[in-house]
Amino acid sequence: MHSAKATFARHKFKFIIGFVVGFVFLLLLSTPTTTYRRFIGTAPELPQIYDETVSQPKVKPPTYESLRKWEDNLPQHDLDLPFPEGKTGRYVKFSNQIAMLGWNNVLNEVLMNAHLAYASNRAYVFQDYVWKPEYYPWPESQRLQNPPHTPLGALIGGTVVGQPFDDSDNAPRSVSSNYFEKVCPSHERRIIYTGDIKPSLAWKQGTEIFDHWAKLLLDAPELCIEVQASGEDNFPQTFDLWLWGSDRVLSLWDSFSTSPTSRLLTTSPIVGAAVKRNEYLFVPRGPRPAYPVSADPYARMLSMHIRRGDFKGACTHLAYWNSTFYSWNQLPKLPDRFIMDPNIPWNSTEYFAAHAERCLPDSDTIIKKARNSRDDYVKASPGRRRTLDIMYLLTNEKGEWMEKLKAALHKDGWNTIVTSNDLELDSEGVDTNMAIDMEIARKAAVFVGNGWSSFTSNINHRRLVDGKEFISIRFW
C-alpha cells in the first residue's frame, strides 16, 4: 500500500514538473529578453519556432481617452465616501501580477486576485493590461507607450473593473491604480512580499492557498496593502503557474465560479460593439433547414480554436514532458479528457503522434471533430431539433492551409464559415481582438478548444458560468 502511494506521488510530481517546464518553455519563447534572462541568465537567444506574418493595421493605435476619463470618474474614487470605501476603506494591490505575457495568462490571475480581494473585504486595485511588445499589433514607431498598455476595462467588464456588485452586497468596489496612489500613498502601505508567504504554501490545494491569503488580508489592520514580488521568487504571482498547471486549482472552482467576480463578469462595451458590428457575417448562407430553427446565429454556431504558429513547437515540447490540460480545462465533468494510453511507450513516434492529434490536430482530425461535436450536440437535444450549420474559427493561421480546410469543411455541411481574419475592426477592435474572439466563442452553441490553452480555459470559464451544457464544451 505504501509503495502504491509512493508510485502515485512520483507520477503526480512528474506531471506537475512536466507542465511547469513546458510552460516555462513557452514563457521563454513569448516574453521579452529582459524578462526571461531573469531565469536563464546570459544564455543565448532561443531560436524562433515559427515566424508568423502579421499585417500592420491600417488604423492608428487607440488612445482610449473616453475610457480613461470614465475610469478616473468612477463614483468610488471619492475620499469622502464612508467605510468600506473612501479614505477609511480597505484596499489591496497585487503588484506581483504577471505582465508582458499573453492576455489569457494575465486574465487567469486578475480574476482570481479580484476574487481574493472580495473574500478579504478589500477593494481590488485594477491595472492596465501590459502587452508583450512582440504581440502588439502596431510597430514600435506607432506605439503610444513602451511596453504598450490597454485599459483593463477595454477587455472585460464587471466588478473587476469597478462596476457595481449586487444591490444587497456592501463590498467595496474595485478602484483604479491611479486612485490607489491617491488614497494609499506609498508611506501608508503595508508591503507583503511573496517570499515571506508562499514557501509554506507550496504544493497545497488551491483552496488552502486561497484561504491562507484571505485570512492574512482580512486580519491585517492596515487599510492599504500592496503585494510585491520577492527577488528570489521566479514565479512570484499569488496564484502562480505551479497551481494553474496542476489539478490542485480545481478545488477553487466551486467558490470561484459562483463568486461575484465570475457571476458579474461581463463583456466590455468595446468588445461587445465590435462583435455586434460583425454579426452580419454570421447570417446563414446554406439551404433552409427541414424544420424550424432559431434565428439567432449563435444558437446554430460551432466555434473552434485552431491555434497554430507557436504551438507547432510547443506541442512537441509539452508531449516530451507528459503535460496535460490546463486549468479549468481539467474539470472532470467536461468531455474529451486527455488520458494517454499507458500501452504507448513514452517518447516514441506513436506517443508523439497521439499527443499531436489532441494538441495540434491536422485537417482530417479537425473535420472529424467538428462533425462528431455537431452530431453529439444534436443528439443531446429534445427531439433532436437543433441545427449547427454556422462555423467560426478562432485562429492565428492564414494562407493555403486554412483555405483548404475551409473548403473541406464546406463540403462536410458547414455552409457559413467565418474566421478571425474576416472580422472588420476599428482601432479599439484591433487592440482587443483576442477578447472579441473569446466573446464569439462564449456565445456559440458549441465550442471546440485546445486543452493546453489558457485562451480555451477562460472561454470555458465564461461558458460554464453562463450555464452552457457540458456536451457543448469539447476539446481536440
Image (cartoon, rainbow, N blue to C red):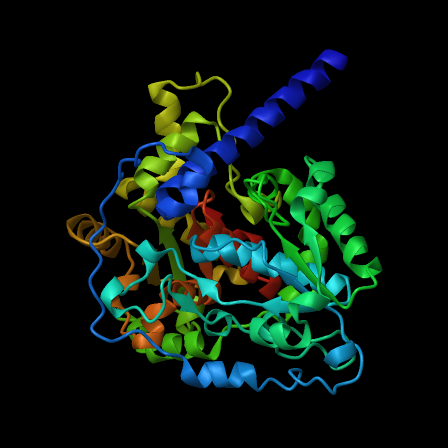
Residue 259 picture location, percent across and down? 70, 64
Asked whether residue 142 is in view, the answer is: yes
Looking at the rendered image, the quarter that the C terminus falls into is top left
Give the quadrant of residue 366: top left
Residue 329 picture location, percent across and down? 54, 46
For residue 164, above or below residue 201: below
Q: Is 364 situated left or right of 239 in this image? A: left
Identify the residue shown where x is 34% and y is 61%: 392
Identify the residue shown where x is 66% and y is 47%: 194
Q: As rendered, which of 71 and 316 lies closer to the eye?
A: 71
Q: As rendered, which of 250 and 241 lies closer to the eye?
A: 241
The residue sitting at the front extreme is: 187
Q: As rendered, which of 300 and 225 lies closer to the eye?
A: 225
For residue 178, above or below residue 447: below
Asked whether residue 1 is in view, the answer is: no
Looking at the rendered image, the quarter that the N terminus falls into is top right
Residue 181 picture location, percent across and down? 61, 73
For residue 271, above or below residue 47: below
For residue 301, above or below residue 70: above
Residue 467 picture location, percent across and down? 60, 63
Q: Is 4 situated left or right of 401 in this image? A: right
Task: Report the number of numbered marks.
Answer: 0
Identify the residue shown where x is 39% and y is 68%: 432
